[in-house]
Image (tube, helix red, strand yellow):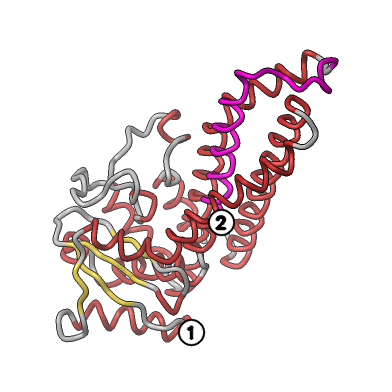
Amino acid sequence: MRNFFTEVENNKSKTFFIIFLFTLFIVGLSYLASLYYGKGSFLSLLGVGLIFSGVSSFVSYYYSDKMILAMSGATEIVRRDNPEIYNLVENLCLGAGLPTPKVYIIEDTAMNAFATGRDPEHGVVCLTTGIISRLNKRELEGVIAHELAHIGNYDIRLASIVSILVGTIVFISDWVSHGMFYGKSDENKDMPAWVGLLFIVLLIASPIIATLIQLAVSRNREFLADATGASMTRYPEGLASALEKISGDKEILEAANGATAHLYISNPLKNTGSTMANWFSTHPPIDERIKRLREM
């Protein structure tokens, strides 16, 4: 049987390790670029890439919640609009020591939910009318706890950090690939052929590698939110049962798109379930999530 706290610590460790690999990859790519183009290019590539992606992520960090809610057609509710849902959110927050987030509803019969907000003080939980009407109270409690866990674990903040790293890799890759037309630096004409070949291979593969690492972080945080949410309710079966019902819902959420799919408790775009699709999925397989919850 899995232990709540062990599960949480394992997922945190995996996330830090993945971010370490991310950073190592950026430094390695920049260093190879410096060997190819000249010593002065290393810090300039790294610095400009971090600044460029950092500015774009700063804007996203502070305004993405408003943009996401607008894109989703979500409407804010207060206690009198839906006392049962509001009370579930409030009671879970009291137990977890979190401020009560704003609650939004999407008018759609598909079963799904997401959380956003850069920190617990600016948190938002959003549920579809489909998930509210088709889950029982214990299952809804599990879903809401999962979303509150994302807020409490600062997953939006982590996503912003990862976005900076991804943006840096893409920026460096794009900038360097354009510069390749001008050839190698004169000071590096004697560079071993294998170094140049490795550099070119990494340059071509870097956007794909960056995306795969970003998705690995996203999948890992889903496992962490499951474990944290289950510890909040002390009833893992509630979330496990909810995930079973959600996985059986074949309806595509109309309000979702590729830019927002990673936020939802289950992929709203319904991938095929193939191995290749799982590699590029923002969510781990639901069967694996259910299995882990039932082992707690």
Q: Quadrant of residue 85?
A: bottom left
Q: What residue type is labelled 2?
A: Ile
* Residue at which label 1 appears: 97
Tell me where residue 124 appears, x and y as whole percent. 34, 71
Residue lying at 55% horizontally and 51% vertically, measured from the top left: 164
Q: Which amino acid does label 1 sit on?
A: Gly
Can residue 41 be found in the magenta stretch? no
Residue to which mark 2 is pinned: 161
Q: Which residue occupies 62% across, 46% down?
A: 48
Residue 6 image position (x, y, % from top left)? 63, 63
Quarter residue 147 falls in: bottom left
From mark 2 to mark 1, how far is it between C-alphas? 25 Å
* First reached walking from the N terminus: tag 2 or tag 1: 1
Q: In which quarter of the image is the N terminus?
A: bottom right
Relative horizontal placement of residue 13, taking residue 95 as reference (left or right): right
Q: In this view, does 120 lie above or below 6?
A: below
User: Which is in the foreground here, disc 2 or disc 1?
Assistant: 2
Quick check: 90 left or right of 178? left
Q: Is residue 212 visible?
A: yes
Circle 1 residues within 10 Å: few <14, some 14–19, many ≥20: few
Is the Cβ of the residue at disc 2 closer than 8 Å to that at disc 1?
no
Q: Is residue 287 above or below residue 131?
A: above
Nearer the observer, 194 or 52: 52
**Within-10-Å neighbours for mark 2: few <14, some 14–19, many 20+:** some
In the image shown, does 91 or 30 lie closer to the viewer? 30
Question: Dot 2 lies on which element?
Answer: helix
- Seen in the image, is 288 located left or right of residue 217? left
Of residues 130 and 260, the one nearer the viewer is 260
Q: Residue 269 carries which label?
A: none
**Image quarter of residue 175:** top right
Specify start and end residues of the magenta stretch as a single range.
161-190
Residue at left 73%, top 36%?
41
